[in-house]
């Protein structure tokens, strides 16, 4: 080969190599642009487009999928008080925490603002999604967030939608998870699964509300009672009244199926009054029959205002019941939603002699620090930390820490969701004061509750002591 031919060949190869390098550079740029188009620039999480690219093939193949939609509560105050730069820094911290908590079980994306989504492929069912949602809220509660040198406590609300049952495509799942999330925010209960019957944008929601008004007039609402026993399981200490709706077509409905809808209307106040009066009258009847216990009644966050005091006074008078034998259970999210208002109302109840318990502690975002200055008497540890106490050592660490710190604050500790003898024994060893759960008894109608107490030898001799 001549020198000219060699030079020409080299020139051609150099041209081809330069073209290949340019092609690789273009491909990399296209790939990077595509990746940037799927990435949230602030947190590094996937964005709405990435969520669609992950969800669409799963849904199109008919596989199971669940969507969790999380919105931070009151995050606007962080931006307004500390500035958007500080707010962005906190969002980055939240993104890291959510990703670490979810791990390989799902994909976390940021949809915008302080709203995040978690896509879970092939979940075992709604219960798995609810457990994951509660773990995310629990992680937020102990997140240790900072905006510069300012420590922050964050909370959130999560809505859940399940593919196939709540929606067929991503658009429907997002819309319905959004409805559930805002329902959870209004109810201040942390987590809610989508329910078409309580969807304010559906005909079913309006129909359910009309039916509920009639149900209250037709005595379709009933109370079931679940016992609370001493830490060693030897003594019956009280009952918790739990409302049920005997729907003429749908059967027995649990509170989660209708309460979120009720809490958006004035009917919640009428329901609170009915529940308290009915529960205390039943307790007074039991006392005359020899069953002497306290009675606990759940109070919606919406009802935690000055008007509650009048309802309490009326119920105590009608049942001739001692205030110290009434326990009002409020959710932890109700405490942080309006801390000043909660302190005022709880202080007034304490002055009257009524005991107050913080329910579902750990399901939302309250820390023990929030309880400082709040005159509550009891702390109920959420069932998510109790149900698998023996299987998860980290849950035992959380439970034992809460018990120890609560006792230092002078609070009685109640564990709910006790379902096994192993959990009951371990809680007793950890010093938990009271236990509640299916291991002892499910919520029972009034007659069955009395029969259970007698069969367990827990009903006392008939000594009537009226307030």
Image (spheres, rainbow, N blue to C red):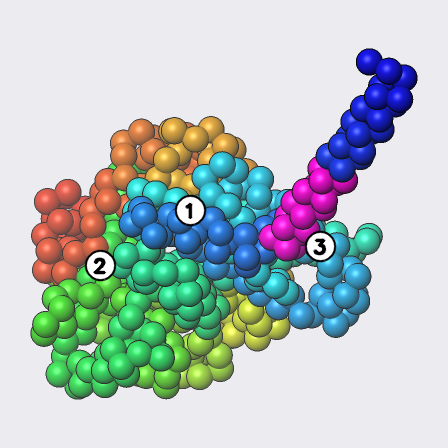
Q: Nearer the viewer, residue 137 or 417?
A: 137
Pointer 1 with pointer 3, Cβ within 8 A:
no
115 on left or right of 134: right
Q: Mark 1 — residue?
A: 120
Residue at left offset 14%, top offset 72%: 247
Q: Residue 91 in the image: x percent, y percent?
A: 68, 55
Residue at left offset 51%, top offset 42%: 102
The reply to whether the magenta stretch includes residue 231 is no
* Residue depth check, mark 3 versus mark 2: number of the one nearer the observer: 3
Question: For residue 303, which quarter of the picture?
Answer: bottom left
Secondary structure that dominates the magenta span: helix
Residue at left offset 15%, top offset 42%: 456
Q: Secondary structure at mark 2?
A: strand
The relative height of residue 370 versus residue 74 in the rendered view (above or below) is: above
Q: Mark 2 — residue?
A: 225
Question: For residue 47, which quarter of the picture?
Answer: bottom right
The N terminus lies in quadrant: top right
- As measured in the structure, the alpha-carbon distance from the residue carrying label 1 to the one carrying label 2 is 36 Å
Pointer 3 with pointer 2, Cβ within 8 A:
no
Q: Residue 339 in the image: x percent, y percent?
A: 59, 69
Q: Secondary structure at mark 1?
A: strand
The numbered mark, 3 or 2, whose residue comes first in the sequence reads: 3
The relative height of residue 322 versus residue 39 in the rendered view (above or below) is: below
- As measured in the structure, the alpha-carbon distance from the residue carrying label 1 to the one carrying label 3 is 23 Å
Highlighted range, magenta:
22-43
The reply to whether the magenta stretch includes residue 40 is yes
| Circle 2 Cα neighbour tier, 10 Å, few/some/many (<14 / 14–19 / ≥20) | many
71 on left or right of 363: right
Residue at left offset 16%, top offset 49%: 453
Which label was assigned to residue 42?
Answer: 3
443 on left or right of 256: left
């Amino acid at each position: 080969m001549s020198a000219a031919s060699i030079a020409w060949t080299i020139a051609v190869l150099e041209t081809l190599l330069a073209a290949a390098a340019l092609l690789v550079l273009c491909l990399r740029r296209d790939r990077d642009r595509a990746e940037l188009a799927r990435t949230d620039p602030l947190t590094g999480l996937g964005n709405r487009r990435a969520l669609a690219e992950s969800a669409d093939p799963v849904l199109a193949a008919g596989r199971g999928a669940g969507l969790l939609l999380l919105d931070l509560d009151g995050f606007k105050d962080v931006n307004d008080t500390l500035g958007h730069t500080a707010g962005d820094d906190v969002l980055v911290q939240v993104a890291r925490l959510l990703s670490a908590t979810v791990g390989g079980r799902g994909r976390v994306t940021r949809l915008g603002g302080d709203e995040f989504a978690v896509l879970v492929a092939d979940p075992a069912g709604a219960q798995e999604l609810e457990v994951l949602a509660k773990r995310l809220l629990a992680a937020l509660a102990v997140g240790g967030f900072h905006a510069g040198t300012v420590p922050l406590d964050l909370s959130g609300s999560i809505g859940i939608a399940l593919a196939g049952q709540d929606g067929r495509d991503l658009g429907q799942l997002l819309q319905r998870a959004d409805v559930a999330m805002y329902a959870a925010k209004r109810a201040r209960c942390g987590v809610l699964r989508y329910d078409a019957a309580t969807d304010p944008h559906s005909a079913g929601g309006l129909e359910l509300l009309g039916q509920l008004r009639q149900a209250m007039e037709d005595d379709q609402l009933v109370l079931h009672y679940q016992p609370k026993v001493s830490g060693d399981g030897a003594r019956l200490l009280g009952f918790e009244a739990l409302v049920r709706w005997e729907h003429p077509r749908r059967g027995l409905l649990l509170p989660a199926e209708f309460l979120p809808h009720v809490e958006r209307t004035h009917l919640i106040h009428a329901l609170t009054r009915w529940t308290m009066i009915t529960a205390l009258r039943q307790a007074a009847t039991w006392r005359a029959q020899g069953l002497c216990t306290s009675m606990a009644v759940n109070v919606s966050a919406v009802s935690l205002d000055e008007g509650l005091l009048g309802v309490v006074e009326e119920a105590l008078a009608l049942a001739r019941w001692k205030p110290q034998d009434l326990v009002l259970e409020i959710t932890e999210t109700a405490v942080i939603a309006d801390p000043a208002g909660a302190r005022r109302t709880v202080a007034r109840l304490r002055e009257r002699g009524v005991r107050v318990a913080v329910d579902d502690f750990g399901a939302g975002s309250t820390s023990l620090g929030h309880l400082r200055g709040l005159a509550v008497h009891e702390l109920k540890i959420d069932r998510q930390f109790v149900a698998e106490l023996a299987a998860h050592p980290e849950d035992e660490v959380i439970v034992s820490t809460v018990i120890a710190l609560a006792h230092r604050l002078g609070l009685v500790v109640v564990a709910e969701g006790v379902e096994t003898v192993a959990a009951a024994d371990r809680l007793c060893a950890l010093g938990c004061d009271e236990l509640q759960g299916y291991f002892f008894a499910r919520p029972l109608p009034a007659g069955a509750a009395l029969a259970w107490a007698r069969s367990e030898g827990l009903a006392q001799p008939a000594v009537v002591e009226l307030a």
